[in-house]
Protein backbone atom coordinates (compact mmCIF):
# COMPACT_ATOMS: atom_id res chain seq x y z
CA UNK A 1 0.00 0.00 0.00
CA UNK A 2 1.31 3.44 -0.87
CA UNK A 3 1.08 6.58 1.22
CA UNK A 4 -1.53 9.17 0.19
CA UNK A 5 1.16 11.70 -0.67
CA UNK A 6 2.80 9.16 -2.97
CA UNK A 7 -0.46 9.03 -4.94
CA UNK A 8 -0.51 12.82 -5.09
CA UNK A 9 3.04 13.10 -6.35
CA UNK A 10 2.68 10.33 -8.90
CA UNK A 11 -0.77 11.16 -10.28
CA UNK A 12 -2.31 14.40 -9.03
CA UNK A 13 0.58 16.85 -9.40
CA UNK A 14 1.12 16.03 -13.08
CA UNK A 15 -2.58 16.32 -13.89
CA UNK A 16 -3.02 19.55 -11.93
CA UNK A 17 0.09 21.11 -13.46
CA UNK A 18 -0.95 20.04 -16.95
CA UNK A 19 -4.45 21.48 -16.59
CA UNK A 20 -3.16 24.70 -15.02
CA UNK A 21 -0.51 25.17 -17.70
CA UNK A 22 -3.06 24.70 -20.48
CA UNK A 23 -5.49 27.13 -18.83
CA UNK A 24 -2.90 29.83 -18.18
CA UNK A 25 -1.54 29.63 -21.72
CA UNK A 26 -4.79 29.23 -23.64
CA UNK A 27 -7.14 31.45 -21.64
CA UNK A 28 -4.91 34.02 -19.99
CA UNK A 29 -2.23 34.14 -22.70
CA UNK A 30 0.67 33.50 -20.33
CA UNK A 31 3.95 32.42 -21.89
CA UNK A 32 5.50 29.07 -21.02
CA UNK A 33 8.20 30.92 -19.09
CA UNK A 34 5.57 32.78 -17.02
CA UNK A 35 3.75 29.51 -16.28
CA UNK A 36 7.03 27.87 -15.29
CA UNK A 37 7.75 30.68 -12.84
CA UNK A 38 4.25 30.44 -11.33
CA UNK A 39 4.41 26.67 -10.89
CA UNK A 40 8.05 26.45 -9.86
CA UNK A 41 9.02 24.20 -12.77
CA UNK A 42 11.07 24.58 -15.94
CA UNK A 43 9.82 25.91 -19.27
CA UNK A 44 10.61 22.50 -20.77
CA UNK A 45 8.31 20.86 -18.22
CA UNK A 46 5.54 23.30 -19.14
CA UNK A 47 6.00 22.36 -22.80
CA UNK A 48 5.69 18.68 -21.92
CA UNK A 49 2.55 19.32 -19.85
CA UNK A 50 0.86 21.31 -22.60
CA UNK A 51 1.78 18.71 -25.23
CA UNK A 52 0.50 15.91 -22.97
CA UNK A 53 3.89 14.22 -22.73
CA UNK A 54 3.54 14.66 -18.96
CA UNK A 55 0.44 14.72 -16.84
CA UNK A 56 -1.81 12.38 -18.70
CA UNK A 57 -5.41 13.05 -19.48
CA UNK A 58 -7.81 14.11 -16.78
CA UNK A 59 -10.48 12.22 -18.75
CA UNK A 60 -8.90 8.92 -17.68
CA UNK A 61 -9.58 9.67 -14.01
CA UNK A 62 -12.79 8.21 -12.47
CA UNK A 63 -15.72 10.64 -12.64
CA UNK A 64 -15.97 11.32 -8.91
CA UNK A 65 -12.26 12.12 -8.60
CA UNK A 66 -12.27 14.12 -11.85
CA UNK A 67 -15.08 16.25 -10.44
CA UNK A 68 -13.03 17.00 -7.32
CA UNK A 69 -9.98 17.93 -9.40
CA UNK A 70 -11.97 20.14 -11.77
CA UNK A 71 -13.68 21.95 -8.89
CA UNK A 72 -10.34 22.70 -7.25
CA UNK A 73 -8.81 23.77 -10.57
CA UNK A 74 -11.75 26.09 -11.20
CA UNK A 75 -10.96 27.83 -7.91
CA UNK A 76 -7.27 28.15 -8.83
CA UNK A 77 -8.09 29.43 -12.30
CA UNK A 78 -10.27 32.37 -11.43
CA UNK A 79 -8.98 35.44 -13.20
CA UNK A 80 -8.41 37.32 -9.96
CA UNK A 81 -6.44 34.47 -8.43
CA UNK A 82 -4.35 33.46 -11.46
CA UNK A 83 -1.96 36.38 -11.02
CA UNK A 84 -1.26 35.27 -7.44
CA UNK A 85 -0.88 31.59 -8.36
CA UNK A 86 2.28 30.03 -6.95
CA UNK A 87 3.96 26.72 -6.36
CA UNK A 88 2.67 26.85 -2.77
CA UNK A 89 -0.95 27.39 -3.84
CA UNK A 90 -0.70 24.42 -6.22
CA UNK A 91 0.73 22.32 -3.38
CA UNK A 92 -2.19 23.31 -1.15
CA UNK A 93 -4.67 22.54 -3.93
CA UNK A 94 -3.24 19.04 -4.35
CA UNK A 95 -3.53 18.50 -0.58
CA UNK A 96 -7.15 19.64 -0.70
CA UNK A 97 -7.85 17.26 -3.58
CA UNK A 98 -6.31 14.37 -1.62
CA UNK A 99 -8.40 15.17 1.46
CA UNK A 100 -11.56 15.28 -0.64
CA UNK A 101 -10.68 11.98 -2.34
CA UNK A 102 -10.12 10.31 1.04
CA UNK A 103 -13.74 11.04 1.92
CA UNK A 104 -14.80 8.69 -0.90
CA UNK A 105 -12.73 5.77 0.41
Image: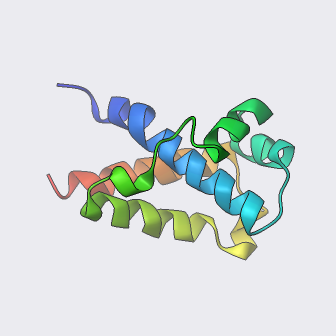
The part of the image, by quadrant, that contains residue 71 is bottom left
Identify the residue at image location x=83%, y=57%. 30
- Most foreground residue, 62 or 73: 62
Where in the figure is residue 70, as x and y percent of width and height? 45, 65
What colour scheme governs how the chains and residues are painted in the rendered image of this protein?
Answer: rainbow
Where in the figure is residue 25, as x and y percent of width and height? 76, 58
Relative vertical location of residue 91 with respect to residue 104 in this rendering, above or below: above
Relative vertical location of residue 10 with respect to residue 83 in this rendering, above or below: above
Identify the residue at image location x=65%, y=73%. 78
- Residue 105 seen in the current view: yes
Where in the figure is residue 75, as x and y percent of width and height? 55, 70
- Most foreground residue, 90 or 16: 16
The part of the image, by quadrant, that contains residue 79 is bottom right
Residue sitting at the far top: 1
Where in the figure is residue 76, as x and y percent of width and height? 60, 64
Number of labels in the image equals: 0
Is 53 situated left or right of 57 in this image? right
Relative vertical location of residue 17 with respect to residue 85 in this rendering, above or below: above
- Residue 42 seen in the current view: no
The part of the image, by quadrant, that contains residue 32 is top right
- Most foreground residue, 50 or 30: 50
Identify the residue at image location x=85%, y=42%. 33
Q: Quadrant of the N terminus?
A: top left
Identify the residue at image location x=71%, y=56%. 85
Amino acid sequence: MSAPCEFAVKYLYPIVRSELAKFLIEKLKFTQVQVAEKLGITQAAVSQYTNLKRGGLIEKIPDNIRGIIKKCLAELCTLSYAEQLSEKSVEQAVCNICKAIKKFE
